Amino acid sequence: MHPLWSTEGDGVGQLSAVETWLLALAGVLANLALLIAIFLASNS
């Protein structure tokens, strides 16, 4: 299912946790970048 994590079924729960972390981090960074872009646009 996940080509990035090529394991033999070991540590599936850990990989799911890592993927959840990465998705959450990506979402936070995207929101932060959006806020910074709006802030810079309103300041110029």
Image: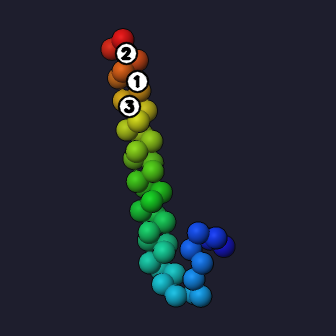
Q: Of all residues shown, which one is farthest toward the top?
A: 44
Residue 9 horizontal/vertical position (percent): 57, 87
What number is the disc on residue 14?
A: none
Q: Residues within 10 Å of mark 3 (few under 14, many from 20)?
A: few
The residue type indicated by label 3 comes to Leu
What number is the disc on residue 42?
A: 2
Distance (Cα) linking label 1 and label 3 = 5 Å
Q: Check the picture and name the quadrant holding the C terminus.
A: top left
Indicate whether 17 appears above or below 41. Answer: below
Disc 1 marks which residue?
Answer: 38
- Report the residue at 43% width, 33% height from top: 34
Residue 3 horizontal/vertical position (percent): 64, 70
Distance (Cα) linking label 1 and label 2 = 6 Å
Q: Quadrant of residue 7?
A: bottom right
- Report the residue at 48% width, 57% height from top: 23
Disc 3 marks which residue?
Answer: 35
Q: Check the picture and name the quadrant holding the N terminus.
A: bottom right
Q: Secondary structure at mark 2?
A: helix
- Report the residue at 45% width, 42% height from top: 30
Residue 33 horizontal/vertical position (percent): 41, 36
Residues under numbered marks 1 and 3 in contact, where contact means CB atoms less than 8 Å apart: yes
